[in-house]
Image: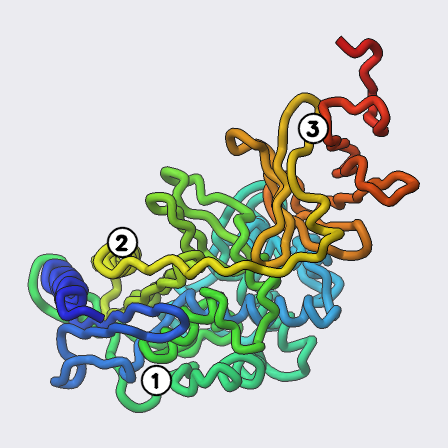
């Protein structure tokens, strides 16, 4: 990166570390799947922290657990609409679905009963589920967003039952190992930062504990480094390394519910936090455990992401800092558009392109460079969607209003496309073509 860009990024993290009194802080920027800049401030063991210094990830752990659950779905071992009871029977909240647990819409209590689970040694699954026998469900499943650490303890148990091994072993074998994240562990190993709370009225450090969370560990147990978290940031941006199908990751990054506790800028997909900022759509997660804060966010469209790790219980604006690192990078070193190149198109597909009408409203059908069809209004946003071929003259909606719906091409006896049937809406070459099957018809053409 340019020296001026590097200085701007370093100045931003230096300001955050100094003003917010973080004992130490390390950050990195990821572009096109690789760390292109990193920096550290403060001290860990008398030295400046680097990309191999471990910090606790907190709830970023959830994103790895969610990925392992989605792998089960892709293998056909579960459906996202399955009730928990089908996979983990015997709980008092078995009506909640897998998707609701992933997206924090299950209605489950946010924290496990008893002592504050983040600062005390955790119990096993039997003790956890026993403590949730009564009053565990605070809201009707699916009714609203309600962040639940308990829900991810439950998903950890679901993984263990399907794979026949503990959730950590599942992550090691299926995600961390294949992605080369060798410094991501359940407890600190080697160079690591100690967790501190900073006294509110004096520059004094208060040590924080980091016990094993037991059955609640899938909600926030893991430790990692900026190097490993950079690899995970790249993963969330689309560089999945064969661990997950790209379309599955895209599903995880799709908004399921909005956090309406404040201005609607944050929501959740399936295991991922989603942030809107000045037109960007960022995906990732924050993390918070006693003594530590962490965040990773990425803009899949721009292929720029960032991460921040710090050993302070609170007071550091990690999310805004992460967003600022992404924004600064793209503003000071804007990406060049990819060069346009002609793309061969099947003549039969090419014949479908051009002007179509839904009733009186004109639409354009285009073939994109990736081979997908784009059907969108000639003017304005309207109901536009992309489509992928699923068979001869049959296409599946991928996004927008028609996501999941089927587009069928209608042809006459000569094989000429006469209309598009999209979820019963008929598109014709001319408005309300009387020769096409237009539901409702037009009785008197005027």
Q: Quadrant of the N terminus?
A: bottom left
Residue visible at 12% across and 63% down? 11
Mark 1 burial class by Cα count in 10 Å: few <14, some 14-19, many 20+: some
Q: Quadrant of residue 305?
A: bottom left
Pair 2/1: label in front: 2
State which tag comes first along the sequence, 3 or 1.
1
Residue 134 vertical placement versus 294 (above, below): above
339 lies left or right of 65: left
- State yes or no: discs 3 and 1 in contact (Cβ < 8 Å): no
Label drawn at residue 188: 1
State which tag comes first along the sequence, 2 or 1.
1
Q: Quadrant of residue 154?
A: bottom right
Residue visible at 44% across and 39% down? 260
State which tag comes first along the sequence, 3 or 2.
2
429 lies left or right of 326: right
Distance from disc 2 to disc 1, alpha carbons, whole Å, reads 27 Å
364 lies left or right of 207: right
Label drawn at residue 358: 3
Which residue has dot 2 on it? 320
Percent coordinates x, y for residue 213 in the rendering: 45, 74
Distance from disc 3 to disc 1, alpha carbons, whole Å, reads 60 Å
Pair 3/1: label in front: 3
Percent coordinates x, y for residue 190 in the rendering: 30, 91
Instruction: Choose between 302 and 173: the one closer to the eye.
Output: 302
């Amino acid at each position: 990166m340019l020296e001026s860009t590097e200085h701007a990024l370093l100045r931003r993290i230096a300001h955050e570390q100094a003003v917010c009194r973080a004992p130490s802080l390390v950050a990195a920027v990821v572009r096109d799947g690789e760390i292109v800049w990193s920096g550290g401030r403060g001290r860990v063991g008398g030295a400046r922290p680097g990309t191999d210094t471990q910090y606790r990830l907190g709830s970023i752990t959830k994103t790895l657990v969610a990925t392992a659950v989605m792998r089960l779905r892709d293998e056909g071992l579960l459906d996202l609409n399955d009730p928990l009871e089908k996979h983990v029977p015997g709980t008092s909240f078995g009506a909640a679905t897998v998707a609701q647990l992933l997206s924090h819409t299950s209605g489950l209590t946010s924290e496990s009963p008893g002592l504050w689970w983040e600062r005390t040694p955790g119990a096993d699954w039997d003790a956890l589920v026993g403590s949730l026998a009564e009053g565990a469900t605070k809201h009707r499943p699916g009714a609203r967003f309600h962040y639940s650490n308990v829900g991810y303890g439950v998903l950890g148990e679901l993984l263990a039952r399907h794979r026949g091994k503990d959730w950590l072993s599942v992550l090691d074998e299926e995600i961390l190992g294949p992605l080369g994240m060798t410094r991501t562990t359940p407890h600190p190993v080697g160079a690591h930062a100690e967790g501190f709370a900073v006294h509110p009225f004096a520059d004094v450090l208060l040590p924080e504990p980091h016990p094993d969370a037991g059955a609640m560990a899938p909600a926030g147990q893991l430790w990692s480094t900026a190097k490993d978290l950079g690899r995970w940031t790249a993963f969330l941006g689309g560089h999945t390394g064969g661990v997950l199908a790209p379309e599955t990751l895209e599903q995880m990054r799709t908004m399921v519910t909005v956090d309406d506790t404040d201005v609607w800028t944050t929501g959740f997909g399936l295991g991922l936090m989603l942030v809107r900022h000045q037109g960007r759509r960022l995906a990732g997660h924050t993390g918070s455990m006693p003594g530590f804060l962490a965040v990773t966010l990425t803009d899949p469209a721009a292929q720029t992401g960032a991460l921040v790790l710090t050993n302070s219980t609170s007071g550091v604006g990690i999310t805004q800092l992460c967003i600022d690192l992404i924004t600064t990078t793209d503003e000071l070193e804007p990406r060049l558009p990819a060069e346009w190149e002609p793309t061969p198109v099947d003549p039969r597909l090419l014949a479908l392109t051009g002007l179509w009408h839904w009733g009186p409203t004109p639409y354009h059908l285009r073939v994109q460079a990736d081979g997908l069809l784009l059907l969108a209004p000639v003017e304005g946003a309207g109901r536009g969607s992309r489509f992928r071929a699923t068979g001869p003259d049959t296409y599946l909606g991928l996004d927008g209003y028609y996501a999941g719906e089927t587009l069928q091409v209608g042809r006459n006896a000569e094989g000429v496309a006469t209309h598009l049937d999209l979820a019963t809406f008929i598109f014709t070459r001319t408005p309300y073509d009387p020769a096409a099957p237009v539901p409702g018809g037009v009785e008197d053409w005027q």
